[in-house]
Image (cartoon, rainbow, N blue to C red):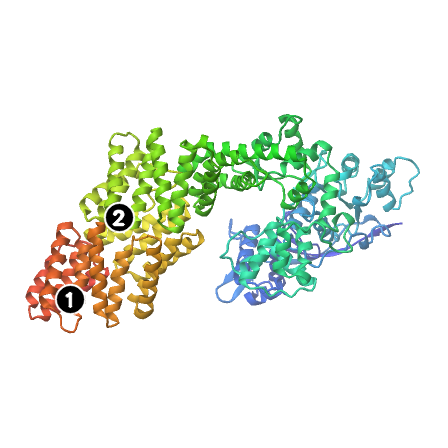
Amino acid sequence: MIAAAARTKEVISFGPFSLIVSERLLTNDGTPIELSARALDILVVLLSHPNEIVGKKELLAQVWPDVIVEEGSLRFHMTYLRKALGDGKAGARYIATLPGRGYCFVAPVSRSAGQRGDTPIVASIFPHANLPSRQSRVVGRDDDILKLSAQLNASRFVTIVGAGGVGKTTVAIAVGHHLVDAFSGALLFVDLGTLSDPTLVTTGMASMLGLSVQSNDATPSLIAYLRNKRILLILDTCEHLVEAVAPLAARIIDAAPQVHILATSREALRVDGEHIYRLDALACPPDDPGLTAAAVRAFPATQLFMERAAASGARLDVSDAEVLIVASICRKLDGVALAIELAARRVESHGLQQTATLLDQRLTLLWVGSRTAPPRQKTLQATLDWSFGLLTELERIVLRRLAVFVGHFTLDAALEVVTGATLDRSTVLGAVDSLVAKSIVATNPLGAMMRYRLLDTTRDYAREIGIDAADATDLSIRHATYFRRWLEQSGKEWSTSSSGIERASHFAAINNVRAALEWCFSPEGNAEVGVSLAAAAVQVFLAMSLLPECHRWSQHALLALDKTGAGGLTEMYLQAALGFSSSQIYGESNAVTEALSRSLAIAEQHGDTAYQVGLLNMEHISHARRGDLRTSLEYARRCGAIAETSDDLTVKALAHAMLGRALQVTGDLAGSRAELDSLMRILSQSHRGPVLLSYDPHYHSYIALARTLWLQGYPTQALELARQGVEASEAMGHPAALALVLAGAASVFLWAGDLDNAQYHTDLSLSHAEANALGPLVAIGQGRKAELAILRGNTKAGVKDLQATLERLHAARHEVLTTEFNIAVAQGLAALGRPDEGKALIDESIRQVEVSGEMFYMPELLRIKGGLLLSMEKPDVREVETCFNESLVLSRRQGVRAWELRTARDLAKHLADQGQSKNGRTLLQSVYAEFKEGFETADLKAAEALLTTLR
């Protein structure tokens, strides 16, 4: 039976490297080099044409023959190949790039016919047919196959460890096919999943090798036979026979130096010489609605889904919208290959959307897979039954209890929640360690902290098995209580985290908070626990800009609050969260006023100064949005009075911010500048400003100062500060706050006449506002777009859209930009030949400004009125000049140099038209001379052009 196999092979050598194409093996002085499949293919093509230019299209066609890819993929793998070769280091030069033409292999190349030494093999025992057929394409596992091949060659004994259904067997078979030539066909694939008796492991392997078994222990005969053989043994599905397989594998590796073993198991064999290769799930696209179909298809999980769905007869030519459903399905299945394949088979009969719906309804465990699959992998139910059957009773109990967690959890959380009267902490700790070792519980390090999770399919399975009702209630209460404590302890950290990245360690726990809230306020839940949990949660929801959730749970909790909790800190937190989130989502209302006033009263009763200041800020903002600017200023002054007696820099910062904004809109620009400069000095000391519910009250202070600077005549500084404000808000990671900052920045760019930047910031603000359900801010974004349309000449549509926006803002009692938008509408009406309507609107705006106290707009309103009067058929010149002169006087009194320049320009032109060019030039020159910067902005360029004409 023994035959000598002498196989010839061609070896391509260059520098210290040798490539055996038939074995797809690249070595550097004999040491195997790991390359991705695509990089190796590129190298083979280039070596086939040494010193010849190979065009990019030719490379793409040969390396990706059946796939349409961009040149970026070629560049990526070319960079990877060059790095592996050390191209360019120590003078080594292998691949040259010829811009616009392609690539060329420039190093000397030699070819030789090598001969493998005689290796005794069993010709009839090791036909290639023993190895199961390889799938036509193993999606997303090229790098795994290459790394495993190199590791197996170097260390001889590798165990692929991973969760059920992740693809361990598929990858092991692919590695076998990859190495079949390297082992001269001497491979033995042993499917241990078909065995249940540990005593049959050795006997089964011996019989597969054709050995005669004449005793109860076949191990000595097996070892003796393998001692001098060069063979690759693939031991598949070892987890249920670990106690038998582990010592046998160790003896083989020790006694047979030419035998290599590749094992697959849900837990390591844990013997000397074993090297673990943990096989992760396939990479899935992130939850990003902006992903295109091309981007989603680049991920292995979605590639597998699409290929298997098409192979099952489904016609998939999905759009960008539909491909997001595919991405969602793959994420729900955690990138587990078996689960993805089973789901993909349903598309042909159920369609894409219905398949996703069935996943949500947990109707997937019994979906049937391939007829040729092992029984344990024909359904997810069978796979999970197999895994569950391998657990001890203690491990099963802990697994069922761990199913209370959603997504990731910490070991501390598991020990706090899962322990009980019959399970102490040490017992739970041991069970968790065992479940991790058996690939039932997945791990994911996040910084220095290890996170754990159950795959969604495993969690659904464990919840279906369940525990009795009393234990389930007790478990859910412990779960909710633990996360309430976590929120109370970590909530303060959110306000000092300067970015979303810094808060990433907390994100994983938020899903558990949501799940606990859902349970607490369900019919079988515990509302009392839910109220305290919601009071802690709303602060973090605000920090994350999750305003709809903040509104929902604060409302639920207040309805469930009993009399004993009324007037306490819990109600204070909930009322503040309800009022603030409601104002942001729906606009100002009596309900908002009542909630904020109630919270403020409780804060005053308890002497909570910091919370008082935060609530005064909310009241200040709320009244400003309604257009009641005098009352808004009163709240700012109340805050200032508290700050004068406080040593807390946070309180002082908030007082400066409130007064700075309030004084600006009332026309006291000098006072506004002083307050905002003081605020910036505090913020420059790296003091972060969030006070109330972890929500940043300084998100638009940069913009407020930028607006003040522009009004005072410093446009360059204003524009730079607006950009800094956007950057600072982006770094904070608060999407809702960022939407407001972007909207404010757009106004500064609009004043400066930079319509493109105003449009960009408006579009970005609108996108964030829509994504975070900020109704009034959505309307403002739409209004700003309409205003820009008017300025760009699309006047009729712009006026109509802006008038509709104003109606929506009035309904939401959100009057912050009413005056500014009225000015745009009036100018649009004038451009449409309807100056009388425009003047009527401006007159009404002047009356509103006098009532509300928004006096900083008065000079501009008077200027616009003068211009509208001039555009009438028979203008009253005296009234026109009165409007312009009153505007100039008020501008100088307020120090609003920007409005003064606009009015001086209009009046100078009017005077020139009246034959008084010299007077007009003198007036405009005197105002223009006061500016020291910003000469590239629209108003100053227009003034300069008019001065040139008047000269």
4 relative position to 110: left or right: right
Q: Earlier in the sequence, mark 1 or mark 2?
A: 2
For the C terminus, the quadrant is bottom left
Provide residue 299's location: percent of width, then percent of height: 58, 55
Marks 1 and 2 sit apart, C-alpha to C-alpha, by: 39 Å
Residue 35: percent from left, percent from top: 61, 52
- Frontmost of labels 1 and 2 is 2
Q: Nearer the viewer, residue 357 or 143?
A: 357
Q: Secondary structure at mark 1?
A: helix
- The part of the image, by quadrant, that contains residue 630 is top left
Q: Secondary structure at mark 2?
A: loop
Residue where numbered disc 2 is placed: 628
Q: Tell me, for residue 946, which label it has, or none.
A: 1
In the picture as drawn, the residue positioned furthest to the right comes out as 214
Give amino acid for label 2.
Asp
Q: Amino acid at mark 1?
A: Leu
Task: Give the crowd class for mark 2: few <14, some 14-19, many >=20 residues within 10 Å.
Answer: many
The residue lying toward the viewer, choosing from 947 and 36, is 947
